[in-house]
Image (spheres, helix red, strand yellow):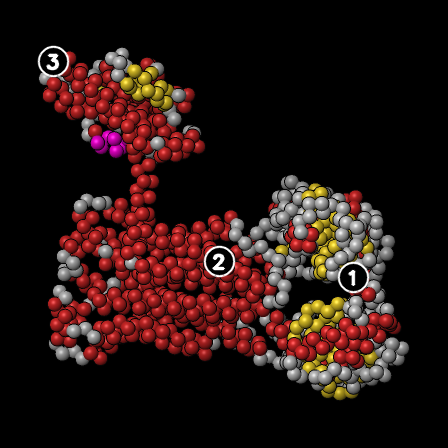
Amino acid sequence: MNLPGEIGRRIRMFFHRDQLYRDLDDEMRLHLELRRQQQVDRGLTPMAAARAAHLKFGNAARIKERSLMAWGSETLESFFSDIAYGTRALLRSPALTLVALASLALGIGANSAIFSLLDAVLLRSLPVQNPQQLVLLGTGQDSGIGNNFVDTELYSYPFYRQLQEKNSVFSDVAAVFSMTDDVHGFVLTNKGESTTDSELMHVNLVSGTYFPMLGVQAALGRTLTEADDNSQGNHPVVVLSNGFWKRALASDPNVLNRKIKLGTTIFTVVGVAPVEFFGTRVGESPDMWVPMSMTKSVPPGWDAYDKNFTQSMNVIGRLKPGVSLTQATANVNLLMQQITRGFSDADLSQKNLDKLSKTHVALTPMANGLSSIRQQFSEPLQILMAIVALVLLIACANIANLLLARSTARARELAVRQALGAQRSRLIRQLLTESLTLALIGGLLGIGFALIANRFLLRMVSGGPDVLPIDVGLNLRLLAFTFAVTIATAILFGTIPAFRATRLHLTDSLKDGRGPASAGARNPLAKVLVISQVALSLVLTVGAGLFLRSLVNLNHIDPGFNRENVLRLQVETDALGYKDNDPRLNALYQQIEARVNALPGVKAASFSAFTFHEGSWSDAVLVPGMPNNENVSVHQNVVGNGYFKTMQIPLIAGRTFSSSDTATSQRVAVISEHIAKTLFPPGSPIGQHFHVGDNKPANEYEVIGIVKDAKFNTLQEQTKNINYLSYVQRPWGFGDFEVRYSGDFDTISASVQQAIKSINRNVRIAHVTTLDAQVARSMTNERLVAQLSAFFGLLAVFLSAIGIYGLMSYVVSRRTNEIGIRMALGAARSNVSWMVMREILLLVAIGIAIGIPVTLAGDRLVANMLFGLKGTDPLSLTAAVVLLVLVASTAGYLPAKRASKIDPMEALRYE
Amino acid sequence: MSRDEIPPGTLYLLILKTLALHRKLHGYEIAEAIEQRSEDILQIEEGSLYPALQRMLIKGWVVAEWGVTAGNRRARYYTLTADGKKQLTLELSKFHRIMGAVAKVIQTA
């Protein structure tokens, strides 16, 4: 069977159907003519001959119809006429159409928007060759640089080299530095000058095998190759990302051989990556890739190319065809043991060997790429996806209800058509086509809505000044998803009304509802729809309440420092070319602190390695007689003398750092209360000596003070272990500078920046913000979920209100007659409106009764996202119930009032 | 003389076989050929040829072209395609299988 040919023939015929009609006519006429002739020849009269020919031939009209139907064009044609008819029908009730379209656009748009984020972060495959063959060593949960004997997440560059050489399971292996380096570099002109100011460039160091292994071809020039990576320090080449090429080089077609200066080294551009390639880490898109051989030349100059035990790389392998993940895991783990032991500088102490023998590397398929944002966003995104799906369900129930009400109003039209012989299936098809038209228009609007919403979403998700570089634009997957959702929606809201509308007692309908059908005005189906709307709205509003309360709870957590009135900025000194331990750096820091401290409006100012939610340096605090300390990781912060005053972290005992602590005096430390209680032996720790990390003499410190516990990374965290060191004694290439001020932020910010620049024009100031904003950033997820769920919760309630209003208006109009009789018999107006309100409240009550257990079950699923309350938070539940009852009563008030205004005489005449 | 309706489903087979024998026929000729060869026993509702022919056109078993009859009338002539010949073999073996089965049932009964 030749299917494509068949489809082709059908389509061709569809466009030539006039021809088909004529041809059929012609040949059938010929047939009848010949047959008639034959009969005449046999001696029949012309009349009898024609009759015989027709008898033999059968019903010509029917046969023609059947012949045409064979081509299926009839179905298509009626489809188009249905669409035209449906559009006209929709235009006849513009209010209904508008409400339906608006709720569809919002419902579908919200789904598309969240889906495109979900897709970009969680689902989409890397734009590389056969991404399903790629596996990662480890789980991809870690990034950074460390010096360990063995690590299962990050690997040293020499380890990658050995693995590449010795493995038998990968067709190739590549290594990529687990962090991008933020460098202030220069794009040089063709003459080699830097005309523009420096700009921030995100540089990713990769092995020479990176591009070839991924199978990514350059859009321009070439990608990096093994030859760029075979010896350290002499391959100053760089491949630009497409985005950077467009942004910083204005898509210069002669970009090849242009130069880029990073730190003190000048790199030659050898290629531009294709537009869809963003690297292998979702949520970070490097501006350029530099071979790992140049690591020392790219600030901050990680020294990792030939250090056997400096782990900083993610290692990615491409499985050979036919090799399973299990086989690959076995091979990698075997080599892990061999390679680690085989390094000439391996410290093969018993402790290390024990550790190595217990080490197991897990391989993770990485078709979707690495991601540090995936873990962070996967739960909130899934929750949001569920929320918007519920909203769409409510919208569907709403539209179904509206259609139901309308189809009842159209009962006469449909009854007439059925009476005239229209098949029920044909009518259903037409009603479904109408729903589909509605849904498709809604879907189109939804896509437009989604594209706009996505920009806001991305900004909300990013939670900072820089928008996350993930692609949430229009693409085929998004369109396919939206289309599927649209069709599903049409089926959901269109089917039941269509079947209901065509199941009629013809005679009753033709009598315009004078028969028993008017009893059907108490439409149970419509009520079920309203009840389910109320139930779903309850779920959503309670959810929103929980998320909002949880956000408030988070905000009320005492971080241990005063988050108000602190300016925070970053002072970058890499342009000065000093090494981290250059004494000139510390002199500069002290000068800045002193100058800023003297400014009017400034109460205190200090440098620090970290403030809050900025990552950490963790190490053990080793105290004699406390053997377990080795296993407790302690955040280490390196700070200036004014840090505690600036942050307003209260001192409990002893003293904080002062000018008497110098580079040559006794090294001292300030510890948090929790450390003092748990990591030191009983009694005052002040004056005691301890080591940080290992027992080398250079790491020995004396405790001089104890401060109150403070939060370090997140507000939720329980860790309270922070050890403070002075940068005078423990040099640190800083970043953070904090200023406690009073008065206007902008004024202070300007004068502080000016003061810093006046000391050294070449330092760079970046990320100017407040400590408060920094804290708020740590709650991005919670805020995102809270705000969006509140928005969607309100939307759900609003949609339900429309549903209730629609249903009740309809019910009242159908019951005008009955109400008129009641009033004629002496029912008070208030009784009548109460009768209507009672019905509404009953529906809402049932909806709530169903919604509560569903809500309780659903809230258990989101328990992880909640803080300081349980899923069974009575306050959120009560608030949601009150809100729903209030809104429902308001929505029902108008129809109820209308019912009470009915004039009995009018109503009776209405018959 | 009594005429029998053709067994359901055999219309395709009859048309295919007729076209295989005569190479090129128009609708009326097909009807005539079937009736003559069956010695007027098989009677088809002649009109039903046309929907069947349309379906066969769609399936690609036959192709049609316009020509002129002996009486100088415009007529649409149908010819078998390669797919049509294949289909004929298929339909024939199906027919024989069914007939054989029917025969067996009747004999044992």
- Measure how far apart labels 1 and 3 are at the Cα level: 110 Å
Residue drawn at x 27%, y 45% as measured from the top left? A426
Q: Chain of mark 2?
A: A
Q: Going from the N terminus, do you reach mark 2 or mark 3 first? A: 3
The residue under label 1 is A300
| Magenta region | A61-67
- Would you say the residues marked 1 and 3 are in contact, meaning their CB atoms lie under 8 Å apart? no
Q: Position of residue B71 (x, y in %)?
A: 24, 13
Which secondary structure class fits the magenta region best? helix
The residue under label 2 is A450
Q: Position of residue A892 (x, y in %)?
A: 30, 72
Disc 2 residue type (three-letter): Ala
For the residue labelled by badge 1, is the local secondary structure a helix, a strand or a loop? loop
For residue A62: magenta? yes
Q: Going from the N terminus, do you reach mark 1 or mark 2 first? A: 1
Residue drawn at x 84%, y 59% as measured from the top left? A347
The residue under label 3 is A43
Q: Position of residue A110 (x, y in %)?
A: 47, 60
Residue drawn at x 42%, y 67% as measured from the top left? A795
- A812 or A166: nearer the viewer: A812
Image quadrant in which you'd find residue A759: bottom right
For residue A85: magenta? no
For the residue labelled by badge 3, is the local secondary structure a helix, a strand or a loop? loop
- A739 or A135: nearer the viewer: A739
Count up the numbered dots.
3
